[in-house]
Amino acid sequence: MNALGRLKSPAAIQAFLDDLAYNKEPEGPTCKGPVAVLKTGSAHCMEGALVAALALRMRGHPALLVDLEAVRDDDHVLAVFKEQGHWGAIAKSNYAGLRFREPVYRTLRELALSYFEHYYNPAGEKTLRAFSRPVNLARFDRLGWAVTEDEVWYIPEHLTTVRHTALLGPELARVRRRMDPRSYRAGLTGSVEAGREEK
């Protein structure tokens, strides 16, 4: 945990996540808590969000997660924070455009919409459709999510049950232009081949 204590800003937390290897889950799906992530030096989206949420809490923020819900694609999880009344986000992703957001968004809807153009599946479809209300991980403190070496599947399972708000009405969601080839390739800059489908 000393490594997280040395991270003095949300940008530093994001840089720490970026330096972690992408967890390709070679032995099957995992949901490691922060302790296991720090031991293994790798994380995927959900695991990175847990590390970021804990690091934010160590800086005096609540440990808040927001789930971005997609169609024909994986969900993506953000650790969100507020500075001067505006929302920002930290995230681990295999896609370049789905990571950090500066705290300049007045609402969580604005923040979630900032991911829309960068959120696409291998077919190039723009797939983001909804976002959840923030979930404060303090609700799981009694289960030791921040200190356990066990898997913490109860957190993503809970995220799927909370209320989500649609970003697009049915008329807007029907026809969306696919990613152009340059933007598609740019979004995969630095991605891990075996995990490209994963957010």
Image: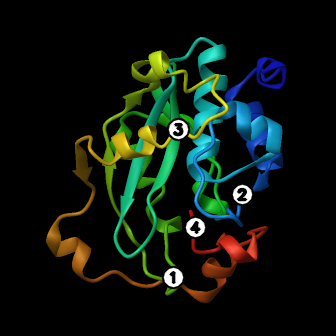
Q: Secondary structure at mark 3?
A: loop
Residue contact between numbered discs 1 and 4, judged by CB atoms under 8 Å: no
Name the residue rendered at 49%, 87% in the picture: 123
| Circle nearer the viewer, 1 or 3 | 3
Q: Which mark is residue 152?
A: 3
Residue 179 is tagged as 1
Question: For the view shown, which residue lies furthest in the top direction?
Answer: 60
- What's the residue type where badge 1 is placed? Met
- Give the distance between the C-alpha atoms of the residues marked 1 and 4, in whole angstroms: 17 Å
- Which of disc 4 and disc 1 is earlier in sequence? 1
Mark 2, Cα crowd under 10 Å, few <14 / some 14-19 / many 20+, is many
| Position in image of residue 49 (x %, y %) | 58, 40
User: What whole-number distance in Å separates the C-alpha atoms at marks 1 and 3?
Assistant: 34 Å
Label 4 crowd (10 A; few <14 / some 14-19 / many >=20) = some
The answer to whether residue 90 is visible is: no
The N terminus lies in quadrant: top right
Q: Earlier in the sequence, mark 2 or mark 4?
A: 2
**Residue 25: horizontal and vertical position, in percent?**
67, 62
Left or right of 162 in this view: 29 = right
Residue picked out by circle 2: 23
* Residue 162 horizontal side relative to residue 140, left or right: left
Instruction: Find disc 4 in the rendering and name its residue.
Output: 198
Upstream in the sequence, badge 3 or badge 2?
2
Quarter where residue 61 is shown: top right
